[in-house]
Image: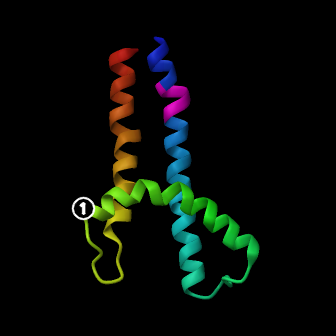
Amino acid sequence: MSIAASILAYFVLPILKLIMFAFFAYVILSWLFTLNIVSRSNSTARQIFSILSSIVEPIVAPFRKIIPPLGNLDLAFFFAAMTIYWISGYIVPRLINVLG
């Protein structure tokens, strides 16, 4: 296995999986805030949400410029998550096979 393929397999793929985990945690925590299951005055939850937001928002922002919200539904978030999933599930394994 070449060095580039090793970097993709052992560095890029785990980071993409962590970003997807952050996306799902961000969604779940935002739902918990919206449904008043977790109070916004909870400082720990706000700190976790802030950390997740600092990971998710820079990725979603370019998609929001292209895809407008549909009522209260943020389709940009969905397309950003699907793009990351596609990169980690299709593009990176193909690159590993080509480089490997």
Most common SS among magenta residues: helix
Question: Is residue 88 placed above or below 77 in the rendered structure?
Answer: above
Residue found 54% across the figure and 84% down from its top = 34
Q: Which residues are magenta?
A: 8-12
For the view shown, which residue lies furthest in the bottom direction? 36
Location of residue 42 (image quadrant): bottom right
The picture places residue 33, in percent across and down from the top left corner, at 59, 81
Residue found 35% across the figure and 25% down from its top = 95
Q: Quadrant of the image for the C terminus? A: top left
In the rendered structure, does residue 74 fall within the stretch colored magenta? no
- The three-letter code of the residue at mark 1 reads Ile
**In the rendered view, does 28 fall on the left or right side of 58?**
right
The picture places residue 45, in percent across and down from the top left corner, at 70, 72
The picture places residue 72, in percent across and down from the top left corner, at 36, 82
Q: Which residue is mark 1?
A: 66
In the rendered structure, does residue 9 fall within the stretch colored magenta? yes
